[in-house]
Amino acid sequence: MSPVVYDTGVLIAAERSLRRTWADHRIRLEAGVVPLVPAPVVAQASRSPKQAQMRRFLRGCEVIPFDETAAHLAGSLLAKSRTKDVVDASVAVLAARFQATVVSDDADDLRRLLLAAGAKVSIVDV
Amino acid sequence: MLSIAMARFVALATPRALRQREQWQWLTNNGVPLISNATAPHRQLPEGMGSEPSSEPRETQWDRVSQVAVSRRPAKMAPFFLSGSQKTLREFSSLQVSHRGSTVSDMPRGNPAVKLAVTIDANVHAKLVDAAEAEGTSVSAWLTAAARRALLVRDGLRAIREWEVEYGAFTDAELESARVRVNQATIRRKRAGR
């Protein structure tokens, strides 16, 4: 099974306890796939320590720091794709790096970014 | 006057020098010569405090010092000790003050990696070395990454079980649907990669 990157929509769905999201997550973990989550995605979804389900969900994810190298790559992708969303760019950078499937509820912008990155990865709806 | 006012302003500023005592932060009346200011006697800390390594938590140590110091307080002790002494001591307890000795005995030492001797089957070891080399990393780093992933899977599945206790266990049909969705995503990715 290929690596997976979660976008913000997944964390929001997890917080809402969407059964489908949790079931998919379980299948991935049972297959030994630890989903990757860029740190900016956590920042975009996290609003309060009361979001217990999201934090519980993240226990089975690897949160990847957004370091200087990734920041420059994200900026470059934004310039190429003429988009502005840094969080989406962080997802695209990570997906391109690991050739990972992206799980997102915002496929359009991500597709432009992934095209700009030259990454041939699929985007799956949440 | 201006220079005196500025000096007072500096003295009343936020405690950038953590060694300053509360007594130096007190307001003085304008126009009164500084020499007439009542200055509290310096508090003498117990000898040897902090100069020896202690396994006690710092707050506990300071609490004990505080009690001793207050109980030994002379009758003529200045207001520094009479008012807010406990508070002051507690504030100090969170600081690393210089009079505790020139050697800082409890300076954090970071989080060094643990050296571990492990036994690995010979054939696994050979594959492990190959895998680490192929990924351009050390055997230690490779093993650490593998252990981290395994721990995440373990904790993640435990988190899902906790969630299922609250929201109901997944049915076989739900899990089968999830399996199909996840596998379809993998197939789509393979096609996209061609």
Image (cartoon, grey):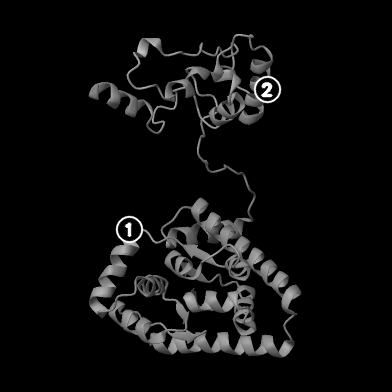
Q: Are marks 2 and 1 in contact (CB under 8 Å)?
A: no
Q: Do labels 2 and 1 share a chain?
A: no
What residue sits 60% from the left and 78% below the top? A16
**Residue at image mark 2:** B64
User: Is there any visible trace of residue B50 in the rendered image?
Assistant: no
| Label 2 packing within 10 angstroms: few (<14), some (14-19), many (20+) | few
Give the side of residue B3 with respect to residue B14, left or right: left
What residue sits 56% from the left and 79% below the top? A13
> x, y (%) of residue A106?
42, 84
Quadrant for the N terminus of chain A in the image:
bottom right
> x, y (%) of residue B49?
59, 16
> Is A53 rendered above or below residue B82?
below
Q: Give the CA separation, mark 2 to mark 1.
A: 47 Å
Q: In which chain is the residue bearing label 2?
A: B
Mark 2 or 1, closer to the camera: 2
> x, y (%) of residue A111?
36, 84
Give the side of residue B113 with respect to residue B120, left or right: left
Q: In which chain is the residue bearing label 1?
A: A
**Residue situated in front as seen by the camera: B74 or A90:** B74
Quadrant housing residue B56: top right
Label 2 element class: helix
> x, y (%) of residue B37?
41, 14
Label 2 is placed on what type of residue?
Answer: Arg
What residue sits 34% from the left and 13% below the top? B33
Count of numbered labels shown in the rendering: 2
Which dot marks residue A68? Answer: 1
What residue sits 42% from the left and 66% below the top? A40
> Is A72 rendered above or below residue B88?
below
Label 1 is placed on what type of residue?
Answer: Glu
